Amino acid sequence: MIFAVSGAGLALPGAWLIALGGSAYYLPAGIALLAIAWLAWRRNPAALWLMAALLAVTIIWSLAEGGFDFWALMPRLFFPVALAIGLLLAFRRVPMASKGARPALGVLAAVALVVLLSPLLRGAGIEGEGVAPTSLVSAAPVDWPSYGNRSANRYSPLADITPANVGRLQQAWIYHSGLRSPDGKRRGGLQFNPTMADGLVYGCTAFSTVFALDPTTGRQVWRTDTLVRDSSGGHPACRGVTFFHAPAGTADCPTRIIAGTIDNHLIALDARTGAFCQGFGTGGRADLLDGLGQIPQGWTHPTSPPTIVNGTAVIGAYVVDNQSTEVPPGVIRGYDAVTGTLKWAFDPAKPEARQPPPPGTIYTPSTPNAWTVFSGDDRLNLVFVPMGNGSPDFFGAQRTASTDRLATSLVALDATTGAIRWQFQAVHHDLWDYDLAAQPALVDFPVGNATVPAILLATKTEQLFVLDRRTGRPLTRIEERKAPAASATGERPAPTQPFSVGMPSPFKGDLTERDMWGLTPFDQLSCRIAFRRSVYHGMYTPMGRTPTIRYPGELGGIDWGSVSIDAGRGLLIVNSNHMADRDQLISRAQADREGLIPRVDPRGHSAPGGAMAGTPYAAHWGPFLSALGVPCQKPPYGEITAIDLKTRKAVWTRPLGDARASGPFGLRLGLPIVLGAPNIGGTLATGGGLVFVAATQDEMFRAFDVHSGKLVWQTKLPAGGHATPMSYRGADGHQYVVIPAGGGSLKDPQGDAIVAFRLDAKK
């Protein structure tokens, strides 16, 4: 029966795939299984010979399509091998005529198993030239006063923990921040990069509660409820707080923590006590709703900490995606970090104005916003702002020239005035939600025999752009390449898109039918059919009325985890995702039938897409999954890569994460097999020659040798570490590494732990 059902399950869809121009393997394979079913029912030994022939062809076809890649071979070979073994068992007492066929089929089954399992024995990853191990000693400061540390490079010069002793790393302390919002309505995870300054470690919850911990024990020193009373709507997140040392003579809060809250305030707290700084704004708060007009609850609020440059705290905000063409303004504002006074406002539609709107008016609605973390350069007096695009993400015919001009651009603003000093657009007329999510990193970039003050921009398209941070001039080659045309009526996609060809990219290349995957031949076949029935012309294929493949998908690429830079060794480390989405524009009439309306509408309900009110279409989008709920493309889905900044070549690449949290239908099968898992969060490079990263769906915290990419340590966290780790030296003289483990960002279980590690006593 299994042979007959399997044969029909391959032959009929296999014929459809051939009609779509796809692989010709499945139809004849299905017919062969049907023939084997009939022969086996008749107890005819020819079934063994036919199965042997099918298995031989399958081995050759599998290697031709997938090479020696375990995950590519698994859906092609595992099931046929299982069928072969079952057939051998069924014929174990068949007359002597089958004796010659049994050994032949047994040998082929063994060969198939060797082919399938040999990649696991060889290990995974791509070797580059490697770099010679070095030991660095640095006199640089060892605190961590802001998100990403100074220069936004996610690097600590501390070198006590090395590849040689990291195996002795043990948990030093754990702190539980709490999951629930103050109003008790919601639960939220942790995404912050911890801050260390003035002898304390600082962090925040998704609902804007700020706390300070003793660095050596994790004991809570203070905790401040920032009076958020309504957590409904929006995207509750706090990616960090910023430490600020006020000018000499400042009596009120000489050292302070400045943060944005999800109820739209910029707050200042005394860094030693957590008390509100009364001289900042009104009672320690500046109102970020000023000039925004009447907006629905949760449609805008900060999710990232302010960047402080020469005493100006610059902050943007999350703005709701894909609900309507009428959404809150994407204004970016600079405040005096001592008084909380607004110094300037950057309205992307009126960048020359730079002042609050006149009474009775508001900033321009629906402009591109900047929700992620900025970076700054005190010497140049610049703040570098990674922009998103105006709502909605997936249809832009209604956008104005002013909306498009700054969208998905890196904009350098004068920190004193808010004036544009330069801009660089990473995606033209963005129709894919490829907003700039990664904090730009500052680096002295090698050019010839000298270095140039540069800024490195990582994008969701897995591009790495290197720009002179003084002028925005590219320091590596960028090509404008022809982009696919639109399939939606009225859309006007950009004819070309920029590609950073002067730097290596983690991008795996455009998808083909051979890249389609599944746990079995059947869901792999269904994914092949879905791929063939979709519109896909490579990266930047615009969404249309026919299902469309978007790759990289919404997760990226490179998201807000950004990159880390070990400047002493000249290495850049980046973790990335390789996940495709399958999207579709639907008519307004269909959206109405589905109840797909803006979330502010009291009749609205959860629906798989965005209403995009104000356009002719709504949208469905999401991961490109098989019928079993697994990705339709082969692993790896996440990788970590080291790049030599001088040679501009990849040194090594490794799959990041394993399969222990993966499985069909959302099950967590617990298989510790290297997979390359979806990940969101950042890396930490250290002077000891290590790269620490959590980020993955499998809830592990790992350390890699930065020279070779070898995994040298890992441990299980209480929840997924969808955050960026940080390192500091405690008062006891030990180096600590700390990671928030809040889960939730990849639909994994949520947690509320901040976990610190240090070396145990020498044995």
Image (spheres, rainbow, N blue to C red):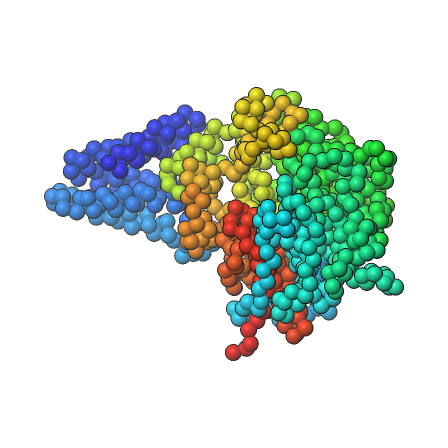
Q: Residue at x 47, y 46 (%)?
A: 635
The picture quadrant where one finds residue 231 is: top right
Q: Is residue 275 above or below residue 461?
A: below
Q: Quadrant of the N terminus?
A: top left
Residue 556 can be seen in this image = yes
The picture quadrant where one finds residue 751 is: bottom right
Q: In the shown orientation, is residue 477 left or right of residue 679?
A: right
Residue extending farthest bottom: 763
Camera-side residue of 423 and 278: 278
Q: Residue at x 37, y 52 (%)?
A: 117
Q: Position of residue 169 (x, y in %)?
A: 55, 68
Q: Is residue 271 above or below residue 351?
A: below
Residue extending farthest right: 249
Residue extending farthest left: 95
Q: In the shown orientation, is residue 291 left or right of residue 53?
A: right
Q: Position of residue 492 (x, y in %)?
A: 67, 26
